[in-house]
Amino acid sequence: MARKLYTIAGTLLIFVVLFLIVTIMGKMRPEVEQETPVATAPAVFYTVAASQAVTLDVEVQGEVRPRTDINLTAQVSGRVISTSPSFVNGGAFDEGDMLIKIEDTDYRAAVAAAKARVAQAEQTLRLEEAEADLARRDFEELNPNETPSELTLRIPQLAQARANFEAARAELRAAEINLQRTAIRAPFEGRVRERIAGVGQFVSPGMQLGRIFSTDVAEIRLALTDNDLAKLGLPLAFVETDENQGPNVALTARLAGQEHYWQGRIARTEGSIDATTRQVIAIAVVDDPYGMGADNGTPLAMGLFVDGTITGKPYQNAIVLPRSALYGRDRVYVIDEENRLIERRVEIVSSDRDTLTLASGINDGDRVVTSPLRGADEGDEVVPTLPDASSEAPVSAATRNVTSGE
């Protein structure tokens, strides 16, 4: 029992000694001064806004097509006896040129027979008119106070003679039209896409003889997005007029190893949106693509695939900023004279992967934030920092389409 008491007493003594040592060392430790942390303003990159005149061009592609492309068909039957030297694949012709001649012997005979029937019907009509006039005079002499009947005056016979005469004249006109149709003429100036019928072939009404297209105007269908329409300032159902012509289109294509250029314009836009692509089709036109509209003799051939640049709507005081300046859909932040953030609503007229073009909301000389704010908000103080030239984002191809004014 005495041994246990000595053990407990020794243990308590050790704890007491350790407690005294810790207490003495704590009092000997120097006191630590308490400092209140000071919040520092975050550093942000910015760019200085500079207004400039810009034209927002739109890059497009499309296939050249004729305005009029038809199947040439026969209206009468017969054997083809001749064709024009121009009626070959790729042949050029003028409006009114005869392309195909169908044998017309039977149709000439039909015209001669119709003329004979007209002469006979006219003779019958004249005789009937004379007899009707004679019957009226005889009745008036024999019955001065009575009213004659229609049969007495030969009115039904006269009406029949007149109807026969008009029918004969109509048959003559039909025979003459059929005779004219044996000569198939070009309804417009154009070219032959495909020749089907040739000399010696028998054709019937409705039979296809070839395919021709007009060369007065070439059309190119160009797909535009909603952003493209905003750049061009075009409404959904635009149709050009003499007072309001469409924007110019510069067309290019590579032929025989050389670049060729043609000038056109937007004539109209389709009044509907494509349900699959959600795009609007604009129709560009080039007048006289095989003549005055050609590039040094190189025509804008039908079926050619071309690249185009549509001249956009000019903005005299636009602001071009990096894409990183945009927060949300239409907000940017500027830094005021006291280095505090101010939120601005802007009107975006064009945007791509790297740049924004603004029509309003930012003034010339404003310092616009171009880096993430990391928790900072409107009214907070920041440290403005200009980025190094080496850290600026490269200008994309879409940005190079923004043409600055003088």
Image (spheres, rainbow, N blue to C red):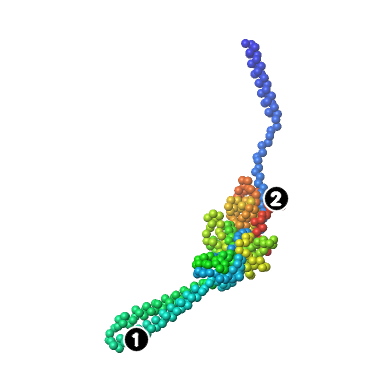
Q: Please say if the residues under marks 2 and 1 sit with CB atoms less than 8 Å apart.
A: no
Mark drawn on residue 391: 2
Residue displayed at 61% across by 66% down = 90
Of callouts 2 and 1, the N-terminal one: 1
Check disc 1 and report its element: helix, strand or loop. Answer: helix
Check disc 2 and report its element: helix, strand or loop. Answer: helix
Residue 404 lies, in percent from the top left, at: 66, 61
2 vs 1, front mark: 1
CA gap, disc 2 to disc 1?
113 Å
Residue 191 lies, in percent from the top left, at: 59, 67
Residue topped by disc 1? 134
Q: Residue furthest top?
A: 1
Residue 297 lies, in percent from the top left, at: 66, 68
Residue 166 lies, in percent from the top left, at: 42, 77
* Amino acid on which disc 1 is placed: Leu
Residue displayed at 61% across by 63% down = 302
Res 185 seen here: no
Res 392 seen here: yes
* Amino acid on which disc 2 is placed: Ser
Q: Is residue 341 above or below residue 70?
A: above
